[in-house]
Structure formats: C-alpha cells, structure tokens
Image: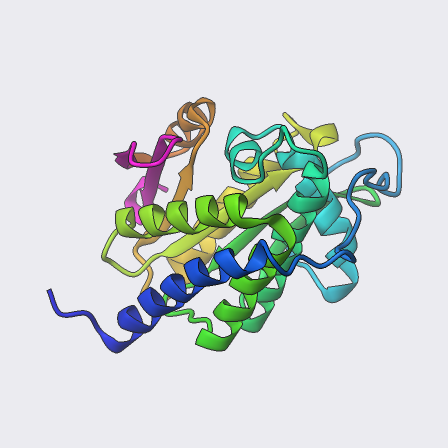
Amino acid sequence: MVMSLEEELKERVLDLGADFVGVASRSRFDHAPDFSDPKPLVGQGRTGLSEVFELEESHTEEAINLLVLAFERDPAYRYFCDAERSGYRRRLGVVFRSGRALQRSSSQPVLGIMSGQRLAGLAIIQEPGASVSVWAQLCWLLKIALFTGPLASRRILRDMRIAERARPAEPHFYLPILAVHPDFQGSGCGRVLLEDVQSRSVRHPCSEGVCLETENPNNVPFYEHIGYRVIARNTDSDLEITTLFRAHESG
C-alpha cells in the first residue's frame, strides 16, 4: 500500500519520537510543573450544569487540574506513566499540558461544562481534516520524552499507533479525551458533552460520526448505551484498546 505524504510524515514523526525517547533518559529537566498536590477547584457543592462551551486560555490550569484528578486512577494512564514510580501525578500533568499545547497548535477546541463556578467536565475533540504540523508533533514528543522518561514515552507512542490503525476510514470527529471531575461523576455531564460532540458531527458537512477509544473495559457499556458500537478490540498492547464509533443514524 502506498502511503500519502501526510501519512509518511506522520510515520517519520513517530519514528523520530522513538529516537527522542532514548535521548530523554540522558537529558531530563528538573523544572516540570509540580502536580503532586493538585489545587482544589473554586466553588462548593453541585448545582445545575451549564451549557457546553469552548474553553479559553484562562481555563487552562483548571482544566489540567481536572484531567489529573479524573485520570489518576485510570488503568491506561497508570500504565502509561508508571504509577508505581514516584512523581506519577507530576508526569500526568506533563502529558496533559503538552497535549493541550498540541491541541492549541491545530486550532481545535476543548469543550467544557460548568457546575456553578467549577469546571465539571471537558472533552478534547479533533474535527475531520484537522492537522498538526510536523514541528508541533516533534515538540510534543520531545516534551513527553524529556519530562516523563523513556518508559512512559514508548508506551504512549506504541498505543497511539495501535489506536490510529483502528479508526474508521470515513471522515469523523475524534474524541481522544472525555474527562469528568471526580466530584461530578454521575451528574450527567459526561453524557451532555458526548451529545454536544455528536451534534457538532451531525452539523459538519463531511463528518459521518464520532470515534473514540478506551483502555478501560468498564467504560464500554456506557458508550454502547448511548449509541456507540465497538468496531475494534486490539490486544497488541499490554492493555486492551477498544475502539468505538457512533454514526449519525445512531443519534
């Protein structure tokens, strides 16, 4: 099969990232953000949920804090970032902060939902045709390698490749991260965010649905309940990666 120029560049970026991982173990920085004790979010209690909106730069710290709290017990991130080693929350913060910078470079939105004065959940999305420059990808890979260490970097790169191969060929919205603050688990904000992404997909002139994946088997029944169907299960990784797709007719 002949690869397009974009596909070939992506492969080269990932290969270069693997090379960076080897260098990183010899050139670690000591001033990465400290996430050993995430700051509490502003506000108290549960109130009605806001409309979904696009996060601005002023929400960045609150969003990173939410992501660390939401995923610190997630099996995939515990595996990626070697949870048994000291500094786990710090490494999580680096992964999410560098991912946010990558999202910003591609001009793709991060959706949020509030409960009172608190950020209750967020969704990171990629629209059909969205692209990230090779330079931005290289910077992202280098940050991950420098701040998380070679083991975490190799695991992330490997599972990225596996996940990409399982996505549908038709144009679609991709949802790499859906996060709900632990204080608002069960409040319905995750479903509200998913429905908003689905509505955006329906309105898009090219998109045929929304794709996501999960390494947590406990999440699969929830996604299936709201219209997603499993399109792939991959066990090439140390974790089973389940890819799901929700076509427009399922909405």
Q: Is residue 51 visible?
A: no
Residue 176: in magenta span = no
The residue at the far left in this view is 1
Q: Quadrant of the C terminus?
A: top left
Residue located at (63% from left, 25% from top): 186
State the image quarter where residue 117 is shown. Answer: top right
The vertical placement of 94 against 20, above or below, is above
Relative to 225, 56 lies left or right:
right
Q: Is residue 15 visible?
A: yes
Please state which of residues 238 and 40 is positioned toward the viewer in this rendering: 238
Residue located at (76% from left, 57% from top): 59
Please state which of residues 61 and 150 is positioned toward the viewer in this rendering: 150
Q: What stretch is highlighted in magenta?
A: 231-251
Place of residue 79 in the rendered image (x, y in percent of width and height, measured from the top left): 52, 33
Q: Quadrant of the N terminus?
A: bottom left
Place of residue 209 in the rendered image (x, y in percent of width and height, measured from the top left): 34, 51
